[in-house]
Amino acid sequence: MNQKWRHAAMLAGLWGASANASSSPTAPVTWEPPAPLTQVALWPEGHAIARPPVTGPESVKDGAIVENVTRPTMTVFPPKGSNTGTTVVVFPGGGYRVVAMEGEGTEICDWLTGNGITCVLLKYRVPTSGPQWDGSCDCRREPKVNMALQDAQRTIRLVRQQATSLHIDPDKIGVIGFSAGGNMVANVSNAPEHSYKPVDDADKLSARPNFAMALYPGRLWEGKGVVFNPTIHVTAKTPPTFIVQAEDDPVDDVRNSITYFLALKQAGAPVEMHLYANGGHAFGLRKKDQPIGAWPRLAEKWMQSLDMLPAD
């Protein structure tokens, strides 16, 4: 099945990271945001959360590929120039095995903050923290606890709680995700409000985003015909959604986007989709010289149509 998510090593190669980065004596033990920004823990110190089946301590390789995350964090990137009051939470990809914090993380924040948007970059728990395709049985494997969804919902709630101090509008919080992160976008847009027991006052707030962007999402297609994943329950209340994918994607079949689009249309939820003949997988912002490189500008126009960005 074409949509099987590849091993973390392939993802690292797609980003063209230096093969020697992780072996450098100066390589960081784990990922850190650019100074002076700092990571903020999602869950209170000492609060017990589900632990993914890690193989060692949290570490970073090839510059920004993070593995074995047991304590998730968020990093707030303030807007550059005029503050629009809009916020976007970023879910990097990585097949629910690793988290690609650069090409699908900090680079995305650079684009968003340049448009006056507050960017919140999520480093969520991995591995096996979300749905995966198991090649040994050619079947879908659902985690006992959807840790990635829990981290996504908690992040949105914390951002809403801190709206005043962050100088943002709590009703203008969107999400964007790539590959496995695109799957997270669909999940957090459609999941029941509570995927975990409330921890504090932040959990009294809604975890539903006001708008959503899914790029080359995975695990939305059932692998036959145009059958949408039955575990995701789309309704007319699903937030306005923007979808982008390349038809030649070798990792997540383009029918992941097509079936999600059709499910949203059938439910009466607002949706806009852009498909490109070429672009492959994990293109992020790195194919500016190709037609698919136009998607960020289309996304900006779409956000303007929702009054999330001011008109040009």
Image (cartoon, rainbow, N blue to C red):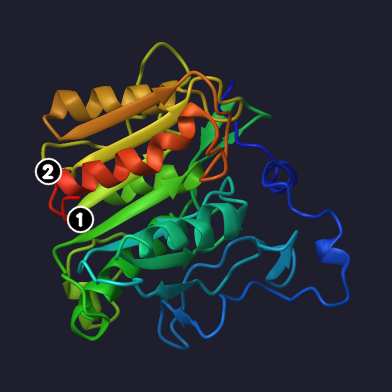
In the picture, the disc for residue 26 is none
Q: Residues within 10 Å of mark 1 (few under 14, many from 20)?
A: many
Q: Report whether residue 190 is seen.
A: no
Q: Quadrant of residue 268?
A: top left
Residue at mark 1 to residue at mark 2: CA–CA distance = 22 Å
User: Label 2's element?
Assistant: loop
Earlier residue among tags 1 and 2: 2
Coordinates of residue 103 in the picture (x, y in percent): 57, 53
Q: Quadrant of residue 113?
A: bottom left
Q: Amino acid at mark 2?
A: Lys
Quarter that holds the N terminus: top right
The residue to which callout 1 is attached is: 309
Q: Which element is circle 1 on?
A: loop
Q: On the image, which quarter does residue 256 sit in?
A: top left
Measured as percent of width and height from the top left, residue 105 is found at: 51, 59
Q: Where residue 85 appears, x then y in whole percent? A: 20, 69
Image coordinates for residue 187, horizontal then vertical, percent: 33, 46
Q: Judge depth for marks 1 and 2 and give the one in front.
A: 1
Question: Could you tell me how many numbered marks the image carries?
Answer: 2
Q: In the visual, does 49 lie left or right of 257?
A: right
Left or right of 127 in this view: 79: left
Residue at image point 39% right, 33% down: 244
Residue 167 in sight in this render: yes
Q: Is residue 311 left or right of residue 145?
A: left
What residue is rendered at 56% in x and 50% in y? Answer: 96
Amino acid bearing label 1: Leu
Q: Nearer the viewer, residue 5 or 168?
A: 168
Q: Is residue 79 above or below residue 292?
A: below
**Label 2 sits on residue:** 237
* Nearer-the-camera pick, 195 or 69: 69
Q: Is residue 1 above or below residue 130?
A: above
Residue found at the very far front of the displayed protein: 312
